[in-house]
Amino acid sequence: MKTQPTFAVTVRAIIVDKGELFMVKHKPTHTYHALPGGRLEAGETLRDGLVRELIEETTIRPEVGPLLFINEWISLANHRVEFFFWIRNAADYHQANPAAASHGFEIAEAVFGNATDPKYGLLPSFLPQRFPHILELGEHYPTEMVQS
């Protein structure tokens, strides 16, 4: 019997300061980093969900800018549609304190780093290759639909 993948809408933050991207590792055993954010709750707007998720994970209230990416990925277990927004107050995230956040237990590591560095194994996989262009254009990067 074939099972249907779990469907979710998620929101993610693109937080860039001084040429580096803010990334999180959810479990110490993970070999990859991702962008902070998470699942939308029923009845929640994309922007409200992103604000809630970032406060829950970092204690920092984001200044949400434009939508840069819409990513769809489908696996045997999951079907996700992800919305990636530019965050305007990136420098504030140097003070992020996941340990003090209500959902900080979900974050094993929060770091600014070079998104193209393989040591981060940044997911989704389209981000490292687009990062130089993101640095160049910032919040003026044209909205792009991708599949990973």
Image (cartoon, grey):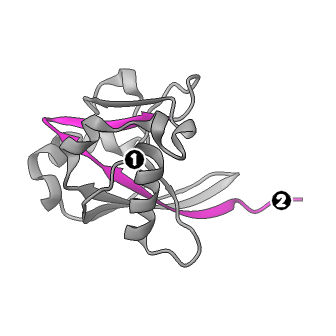
* Residue at the disc numbered 2: 2
2 or 1: mark nearer the eye: 1
The residue lying at 41 percent from left, 61 percent from top is 50
Residue 20 belongs to the span the image colors magenta:
yes
Location of residue 127 by image quarter? top left
The residue lying at 41 percent from left, 52 percent from top is 54
Asked whether the residues under the numbered discs 2 and 1 touch, taking CB atoms below 8 Å apart as contact, a structural biologist would say: no
- The N terminus, quarter of image: bottom right
* Secondary element at image label 1: loop
Which span is picked out in magenta?
A: 1-25
Q: Residues within 10 Å of mark 1 (few under 14, many from 20)?
A: many
- Residue 53, image x, y percentages: 46, 55
Residue sitting nearer the eye, 133 or 49: 49
Q: The disc labelled 2 sits on which kind of residue?
A: Lys
Location of residue 144 by image quarter? bottom left
Q: The disc labelled 1 sits on which kind of residue?
A: Thr
Q: Tell me the tag on residue 59.
A: 1
Q: Is residue 113 left or right of residue 58?
A: left
